[in-house]
Image (cartoon, rainbow, N blue to C red):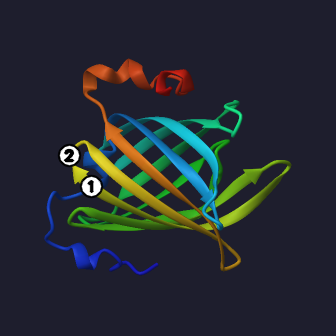
Amino acid sequence: MSINSTAAYRGTLPRFTLDGFFSGPLVASGVFCDRKRRVRNRFFMNMLGNWEGKRGTLEERFTFLDDQGNSSHAERVWKLEQIDERNFRGTAAGSAGDIVGIAEGSAEGYAMHWQYTVRQPVGDKAYNLRTDDRMYLLGPQHVINHSRMHFFGFFVGEAIIEIHRLGADELDAVRGHPRPETYR
């Protein structure tokens, strides 16, 4: 990974920190588009981040909707480590796909970039997708995430996700999987 991939954003504000944004309860929604830019999945996420010093855990609970509105659920738990002011790494496991090896990233200004390989279940099979994940902090409570996935160097799709931090008093809102009916 190019650790300086966020260098163009150095000095921009607000400053995006992994432990600052991904702490406490969060909610997100997004779409996964295939290489032809057709939406293949709509999804909602409940997340909860906890930090102790430079080490953190980010629990993610997904609800996916297919074209007929049928829902399925998955989970992933990230184990994160802030290496220094700008660099971080992590691993993750769960039914939403395990991270193969270590995810590595950096942050500068309002931008964050990390790369990792996710073992993505698809039907009865699983594929190792190389993921290029870029996040942009729009304000203290709001991030836009754009992830591009490749399989053996070929572009297979992308996820576009909007993430919102909730107040500490909204912890109950992220318990369990998101309920799609609350978004209709």
When asked about the image quadrant of residue 168, the answer is top left
Do residues under tags 2 and 1 come within 8 Å of each other at their CB atoms? yes
Residue in front for this viewpoint, 139 or 91: 139
Residue in front for this viewpoint, 48 or 145: 145
Q: Position of residue 145 (x, y in %)?
A: 41, 56
Determine whether, in the image, residue 26 is placed left or right of residue 65.
left
Determine whether, in the image, residue 31 is placed left or right of residue 168.
right
Q: Secondary structure at mark 2?
A: loop
Q: Position of residue 13 (x, y in %)?
A: 14, 61
What whole-number distance in Å separates the C-alpha atoms at marks 2 and 1?
A: 7 Å
Q: Residue at x 31, y 59 (%)?
A: 136
Q: Residues within 10 Å of mark 1 (few under 14, many from 20)?
A: many
Q: Residue at x 50, y 46 (%)?
A: 30
Q: Which numbered tag is attached to residue 140?
A: 2
Q: Which numbered tag is attached to residue 137?
A: 1
**Residue 54, visible in the rendered structure:** no
Q: Position of residue 69 (x, y in %)?
A: 67, 31
Determine whether, in the image, residue 85 is placed left or right of residue 99.
left
Q: Residue at x 40, y 47 (%)?
A: 162
Q: Secondary structure at mark 1?
A: strand
Residue kind at label 2, given as amino acid type? Pro
Residue kind at label 1, given as amino acid type? Leu
Q: Is residue 111 above or below residue 143?
A: below
